[in-house]
Amino acid sequence: MSNILEVNAISKRFGGLIALNNVSLVIPQHSIVGLIGPNGAGKTTLFNIITGLYRPDQGHMLLLGKRLPVGQAHEVARCGIARTFQNIRLFGHLTVLENILVGRHLRSTASVLGAIFNTAHTRQEEREMRDKAFYFLNYVGLSHRAQDYAKTLSYGDQRRLEIARALATEPQVLALDEPAAGMNSKERQDLAQLIQRIKEEGVTVLVIEHDVKWIMSLCQQVSVLHFGQVIAEGDPHLVQNNAKVIEAYLGRGQHHVA
Amino acid sequence: MKKSLPLIVLACLLPWLVYVFIGQSWVRILDFSLLYLMLSLGLNVVVGYAGLLDLGYIAFFAVGAYSYALLSSPQFGLHWPLLVILPIGALCAGVFGVLLGAPTLRLKGDYLAIVTLGFGEIIRIFLNNLSTPINITNGPQGISEIDPLHVGSFVFNHSSALMGISVPSVIHIYYLFLLAVIVTIVFSYRLEKSRVGRAWMAIREDELAASCVGIHTKRYKLLAFGLGATMGGLSGGLFAGFQEFVSPESFTLMESVMILCMVVLGGMGHIPGVIVGSLLLSVLPELLRESAGWQKSLLGSVWVDPANLRLIMFALALVIMMLLRPEGLIPSSVRKKELHHE
């Protein structure tokens, strides 16, 4: 299996705080990769660097062997990486359908002139976009709410809408930042199924999560970040029993120094 | 489109009704309110759709007006045809819009408002002072004897006779402006429902999330500034040709604020709201002007100077609006929900 995304020796500091220190990750194609670690370990910072919201101080990333642009979120999206946010960031005062249509931005071409003269091409594209948008809404089971404002959706539905919006860009890599946060166990299960389905469509999924048990059952590979460094990676069960990981999560046992 | 047909018919009959029953001066007021409507629609692109607070919008109106004035007046001895100058004026204003937009891309909210406010003032001060060393704008005296609005030999600013009925100039102008307004409304509406409009609204809602779905936020913000300014420039050109005179004092900060009020009063980002807001705010002050006469007949003397009364009523209206209907008179259903159910 080839690697879709390679993160090479990324470092990022905020003033005196070293958020990421020489972090490298390899994400195999068509897999679900988990990124775990205690609070403040640098998971979201790494996500923000991969998706172009932050510029790394050092290091670079390769998507299918090609250098990924840094610090330009819209360029990263164009290259095929879509994301969701830890604290849901929908376009609250647009309808559910419009949120998806915004997600289709990269897959459509209508310009200002095309819009104001309402050309045949624009109308055709608009129709196709709507059909496609409903496909994604159906995919996450939200098509019955298409005309409601995104703000009025329940928490779980908002999470799913955000995923659908990211999927609408037709990404190669989908990065989910704590998608299961605040969900009950039934919702978590549904979400896991949804992620599984997305993977089967050929999208590589990268997930940040706190719930270790949930992520262990979902992912083929897990990386553990602690204080800005990768302390373990690989098979979920091996990682789970890794001494460093246990220490990071539970703290060091008492050692009596003689 | 079907629903708006009666409205269009009404809009076409209105000047005649006003002319016959009230008088010519009120048709002139209608002409001006159509200009204000165009300006509000332009500002609505910037403030309503893209969510960029612009307090110097009148500057683009000024650029359009002066472009027209310089290209068709004795100032430089140029007398280009209307259909050439209007697009040039609009384009110039658009360029200025992008020029203002480019350095302010990183700014948001209050900070952006301050910079745009400064920009508006800079343009006005330039117009006031560009009479030396080379006389371009003729300074505070302004430019007079501007060619009237005309196409071929037909002059909108002169009355004409049609089948024995004399048509006053203000009604010609009204129809010309109405045409421009309808075109602007159609374009605005199409933009709102298009990929471009959605990209603007996404930026307004959440710029970060917008960039993460691949929207080039800088480009789209510049586009909003440029297009909004273009609309302002177009109405500026029409204004110059209508007045046959421009001077810097028409382009004060108060005017920018006024147009912003029109957009906010009616309901930001919602075209029917913007239409109602701008018509109300451009006609109401004129009504209050008449209040001197009423005061005299009711109270025996003029208690409050109508000019002051105007401002008092204005302030009062805005304060009451913000308290009772912060979403605007005719809001889009979104904003209504947002402001009343949380």
Image (cartoon, rainbow, N blue to C red):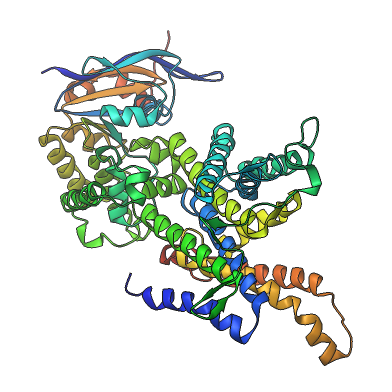
**Residue B132 at what x, y percent from top left?**
81, 33
Q: Residue at x 56, y 18 (%)?
A: A16
Image-quadrant location for residue B239: bottom right
* Residue B71 at x, y percent in the picture: 62, 43
Q: Residue at x 25, y 61 (%)?
A: A145
Q: Is residue B300 above or below residue B129?
A: below
The reply, left or right, for residue B93 in relation to residue A226 is right
Q: Residue A136 vs residue A100: left or right?
A: left
Q: Looking at the image, which residue is at 56% across and 40% down? A: B92
In this rendering, is residue B80 above or below B280?
above
- B33 horizontally vs A190: left or right: right
Q: Is residue B27 visible?
A: yes
Residue B12 image point, x, y percent: 47, 75
Figure quadrant of residue B185? bottom left
Q: Is residue A41 above or below residue B18?
A: above
> Split into 4 quadrants, where in the image is the N terminus of chain B?
bottom left
